[in-house]
Image: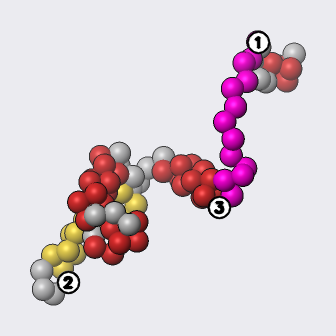
Amino acid sequence: MRTTAHALQFSEGEAFALLEEFCTLEWVLPESIDMGDGPVRVYRPGDTMALLPLLCFAREFLANAKLFYLNNYLRTKPLLQNMLE
């Protein structure tokens, strides 16, 4: 937990709360492994693929924020209507 918190520049409590929220969403699943001096809590990716689109978007946004902008186009007809006609 300490390494994750340090990498994210979070407190250990904030990192733990974030990972617990990810567990609630089933993005990660908690497990326990024995390291010889006692059990250690670890996390593995969840079985759901719901996190993948979020991670792809986050990577693009962080890699080049110039490609992201907010827009508010008002449609008067469905986007793909011409394909159906």
Observer-nearest residue: 17 or 51?
17
What residue occupies the far left of the structure in this picture?
A: 38
The quarter of the displayed image where residue 74 is located: top right
Q: Which residue is mark 3?
A: 63
Q: Which residue is mark 1?
A: 76
Q: Residue at x 69, y 26 (%)?
A: 72
**Callout 1: helix, strand or loop?**
loop
Q: Which mark is residue 35?
A: 2
Q: Is residue 57 left or right of residue 40?
A: right
Mark 3 and mark 1: span between their CA atoms? 34 Å
Disc 3 marks a residue whose amino acid type is: Ala
Residue 38 in the image: above or below residue 82:
below
Query: Where in the figure is residue 51, as x and y percent of width and height?
Result: 48, 51
Which mark is first along the chain, 2 or 3? Answer: 2
Label 1 or label 2, whichever lies nearer to me, is 1
Check if residue 67 falls in the magenta segment.
yes
Disc 2 marks a residue whose amino acid type is: Met
Label 3 or label 2, whichever lies nearer to me, is 3
Q: Is residue 48 left or right of residue 23?
A: right
Q: Where does the N terminus fall, quadrant-wise?
A: bottom left
For the magenta stretch, what is the residue range? 64-76
The quarter of the displayed image where residue 25 is located: top left
Query: Predominant secondary structure in magenta?
Result: loop
